[in-house]
Image (cartoon, rainbow, N blue to C red):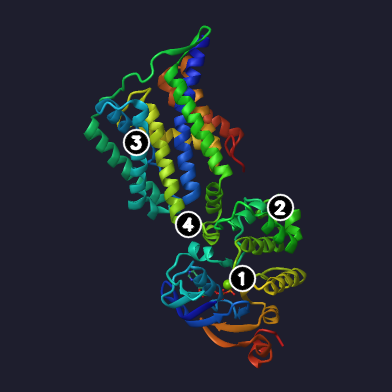
Amino acid sequence: MLQLDAVDCHYAKVHVLRGVSLAVGAGEIVSVIGPNAAGKTTTLRVIAGLKDVSGGAVRYEGEDVTRRPAFERVRRGLILVPEGRQIFPRFSVLDNLLMGAYQRPDRHDLDRDLATVYELFPRLHERRGQKGGSLSGGEQQMLAIARGLMGRPRCLLLDEPSLGLAPIVVAEIGRTIKALAARGLTILLVEQNAAMALELADRAYVLESGHVSLQGQASELRQTDVVKRLYLGA
Amino acid sequence: MTQLVLGQVLNGAIIGAMYGIIALGITLTFGITGIVNFALGEFMMIGAYATYALAERFGWPYPVAVVPACLIAAAAGYLANKAFFRFTRNNLVNGLLVSIGLISILESAALLFWTATPLEMHFVLPGALRLGEVGLPKMKLVVFAVILAVIVLTYLGLARTWLGRAAFAYAQNPEAAMLMGVHTPRLETAVMLYSTGLAGLGGALYASLYSLEPAMGGVYVLKGMEAAILGGIGSLMGSLWGGVILGVIEGVGSIFLPTAFRDAYGLAILVAILLFRPAGLFGTE
Ligand SMILES: Nc1ncnc2c1ncn2[C@@H]1O[C@H](COP(=O)(O)OP(=O)(O)OP(=O)(O)O)[C@@H](O)[C@H]1O
Ligand SMILES: [Mg+2]
């Protein structure tokens, strides 16, 4: 469904991604884990079209989208929930959610979609009139995910949804991701929280200083020494 | 006396609405695209002279001349954006430099073409509406009604449509707006077309009432800035009301004070209001 072929990427002169290749099949949950500054966020920005590659290709649903602008990829259901939430602080929760459906041809009739995300995140329903900027960190993360879902993703890209959240909220987000996958949504999950990522994912990649150092079934990766030592703190 | 005051209120409201249109354009452009367009007054000048040329030189009826005049101003805005402004995003100093450059070029061009002699159009709609002992010129009422209609439509367009929602989203977080599927280059172009076209409309309406000079744009940008500050920087409707209030203060003030001080007392009241409301009349802290 989604595939990176030997992607290279630079910020000015700094070589941030060095030949990153990865694939996500339809209906899979795939995670990318790795230390700070490994290039995880950059990888997702490349996939979403926010960052140009300096080499390699991005393929989505069988098509080369490497040079397609971000808004076009969104229209095809390739939707990024960015790091740090990036919700619209001066919009109400409801307006944030509606904005998520901006590119949909059927955006005038969103009652069903709203009902679905409110069911996933009852808290957002309680706060639907509140300004996005006044939500707690956890609520903002829920809003960011819900806003992404309003766009009817076929492939959802999540960048560190657990960042800065209390364990109980992390667990809640984890359950939501599972529920979404159970409905057949394809998910690429980037996480520093390796325990969470490897528990949720079918397959996983370890990204280190811009290249894939390890990959495989999540259950197998969990057993490898490197992952245990460096990422699971065992 | 009533005649004098009411007449000046209407006059002030019209001139003020022009300030407001410029203020709205500046606020909208900066708020949404991060581009500073202080040359907006020049697009008003373009609209005004285009109307004059079409109506007086080509003999088109005034209402027919207004539409292409707005389009010409918007086209000039489009070119200015493509050639200069789009490179000044989020860079105040460069935006100012481009604005100053454009002001000099466009004013010189107008001077060359139209000379410094003030030009006046023939009466478009003569006569006055009599309300008891008070008479209000019909054309001024029409101009005021048109501006009011445009303002209401702008408000509805921003508050009630998906395009407006996208514009506000883009203003808050351009990248997130892109992630929602907003065609951001097109949105930026739309804002530029709208603000310069609106300034052109202001100019076209102005041409029907007052005499034209190549330097008219500069005055309106300064007053537009005052209006934007008075209304509260960043508040779209506030900048419009700020303009109207400033215009009415100037108009009514000129009954009691020498007109030479017109610019001064507008500014004095602006300072006085800011002392009590630092964020402007409609701004939030
Ligand atoms: N806008 C930018 N300009 C310059 N360098 C950047 C920029 N964004 C990221 N980088 C650099 O690229 C490298 C990879 O950053 P990236 O954000 O992709 O890492 P990450 O794996 O997501 O890290 P984290 O876990 O901290 O989010 C880092 O060295 C970072 O400093
Ligand atoms: Mg990151």
Q: Chain of mark 4?
A: B
- Residue B269: x and y in percent read 53, 27
Residue that label 1 marks: A158
Name the kind of residue labelled 4 in the image: His
**Are dots 1 and 3 in contact, CB under 8 Å?**
no
Q: Secondary structure at mark 1?
A: strand
State which quarter of the image contains the C terminus of chain A: bottom right
Residue that label 3 marks: B68
Q: Secondary structure at mark 4?
A: loop
Q: Mark 3 Cα within 10 Å, few/some/many (few <14, many 20+)? A: some
Q: In the picture shown, does residue B115 fall above or below B166? A: above
Q: Chain of mark 1?
A: A
- Residue B95: x and y in percent read 39, 49
Residue that label 4 marks: B183
* Mark 1 residue's CB less than 8 Å from ligand 2: no
Distance Cα–Cα, label 4 vs label 2: 26 Å
Nearest the eye: B28 or B105: B28
Nearest the eye: A144 or B235: A144
Mark drawn on residue A128? 2
Distance Cα–Cα, label 4 vs label 3: 27 Å
Distance Cα–Cα, label 1 vs label 2: 23 Å
